[in-house]
Amino acid sequence: MRAAMKQLGYVDTYHMMSCSIENPPDALMWMDALTAKYDGIGAPFTRADWDQLLGHCQAVCDWPAIAFAKELIEAYPEAKVVLTNRDVNSWHASTMKTVFWRVMDPQLKALSYVNWAAGMYQPMLKKFFDTFFEGDFEGRGKDVFKRHYQLVRELVPAENLLEFKVQDGWEPLCQFLGESIPCGEKFPNVNDNRDFVSRSRRRNRMQILNVGVRCLECSLIAAMCIWLVAMLWRM
């Protein structure tokens, strides 16, 4: 959906990658929002808070935003909502092998202690699954999925809601949003999760390399300081 929205001109469409890859510090605000909603610690987010986090975007999709469907719908009652329908069983099986696998990834957990980006988004990702999916994605994920869809249907006025499947293509989406159908362009199908694990492990390796480089830099600086102190002591 993010790729499709970008093709329609919604260039800044917020997505899980916006937080996990493109701007990890966003995870700090998402963590504040999750803590306020589920733990009662801190003030619930207002429209001003959501504007601070998402105000630069033209559209929002995917996690962690789905945990705040009610709050976002109430904060932006004028917004149009596209409910992308998927078979719950195929969705659950796919997520078990991708995002949930990432939550349980021991490399990412270890990196969260030494890498600045992983240290922000890994705790937030785990918090998201522990709260929105009630700490049991494997057992309760499908039920949460169904309740989430029902909640959205109850909250959004019919004129602002589109029930959509990506197989439907451009026409219903463009008609709903009041956009022109992209000429000669197929509806994007870029959500291929077959290489999700390999991409995640490659990202882990890059973060490990980053940690190694920083450790080397610190070691060189420390060695230089020791050398300077020794030289001054001899003088």
Image (cartoon, grey):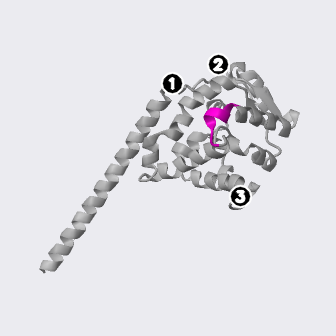
Q: Residues within 10 Å of mark 2 (few under 14, many from 20)?
A: few
Residue highlighted by disc 3: 40
Residue 194 tag number: 1
Q: Residue at x 63, y 20 (%)?
A: 186
Foreground: 128 or 86? 128
- Give me the C-alpha separation between circle 2 and circle 3: 50 Å
Residue 184 tag number: 2
Give the left or right position of residue 168, taking residue 96 as reference: right
Q: Residues within 10 Å of mark 1 (few under 14, many from 20)?
A: few
Q: Are marks 2 and 3 in contact (CB under 8 Å)?
A: no
Q: Residues within 10 Å of mark 3 (few under 14, many from 20)?
A: few
Q: Position of residue 209 (x, y in %)?
A: 35, 45
- Give me the C-alpha separation between circle 1 and circle 2: 27 Å
From this view, report whether residue 81 is shown above or below residue 47.
above
Query: Does residue 151 show up?
Result: yes
Q: Which residues are magenta?
A: 135-142
From this view, report whether residue 159 is shown above or below residue 110.
above
| Overall secondary structure of the magenta section | helix
Q: Secondary structure at mark 3?
A: loop
The type of residue carrying mark 3 is Gly
Frontmost of labels 1 and 2 is 1
